[in-house]
Image (cartoon, helix red, strand yellow):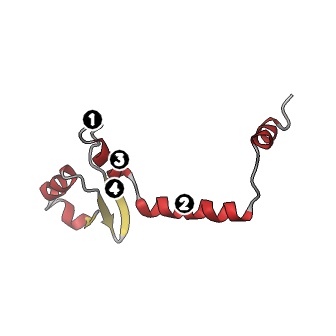
């Protein structure tokens, strides 16, 4: 992913579009703050499906989520399907 300052975007618009066309995401910042994220168009045909999915996945966030779930599972007891259904229906008449 590229980071581009607003002072650069007008002068290098063709470079930004070329990068997006190659599948890169571009973040445009102003005064150090993220203002815009330019994400390439996703093509959902069989040939490009894997590329499209890979481009949408933020691997660090996925890894964080998996680790968080593992930690929660260590602290909680297993729950049966009956318990889940009972909790779902609790308070319903």
Screen quadrant of the C terminus:
top right
Residue at the image position 31 percent from the left and 61 percent from the top: 27
Screen quadrant of the N terminus:
bottom left
Circle 3 sits on which residue? 53
- Give whichever of discs 4 and 1 has the lower sequence position: 4
In the image, which disc is placed on residue 45? 1
Where is residue 52? Give x, y as percent.
31, 46
Circle 1 crowding by C-alpha within 10 Å: few under 14, some 14–19, many from 20: few
Residue at the image position 52 percent from the left and 64 percent from the top: 64
Circle 4 crowding by C-alpha within 10 Å: few under 14, some 14–19, many from 20: some
Q: State the CA–CA distance, disc 2 to disc 1.
A: 29 Å
Circle 2 crowding by C-alpha within 10 Å: few under 14, some 14–19, many from 20: few
Residue sitting at the far bottom: 32
In the image, which disc is placed on residue 56? none
Circle 4 sits on which residue? 37
- Give whichever of discs 3 and 2 has the lower sequence position: 3
């Amino acid at each position: 992913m590229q980071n581009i300052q607003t002072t650069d975007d007008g002068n290098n618009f063709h470079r930004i579009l070329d990068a997006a066309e190659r599948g890169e995401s571009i973040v445009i910042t102003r005064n150090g703050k993220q203002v815009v994220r330019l994400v390439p168009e996703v093509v959902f045909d069989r040939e490009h499906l894997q590329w499209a999915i890979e481009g949408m996945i933020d691997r660090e966030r996925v890894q964080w989520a998996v680790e968080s779930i593992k930690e929660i599972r260590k602290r909680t007891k297993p729950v049966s399907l009956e318990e889940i259904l009972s909790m779902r229906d609790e308070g319903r008449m």
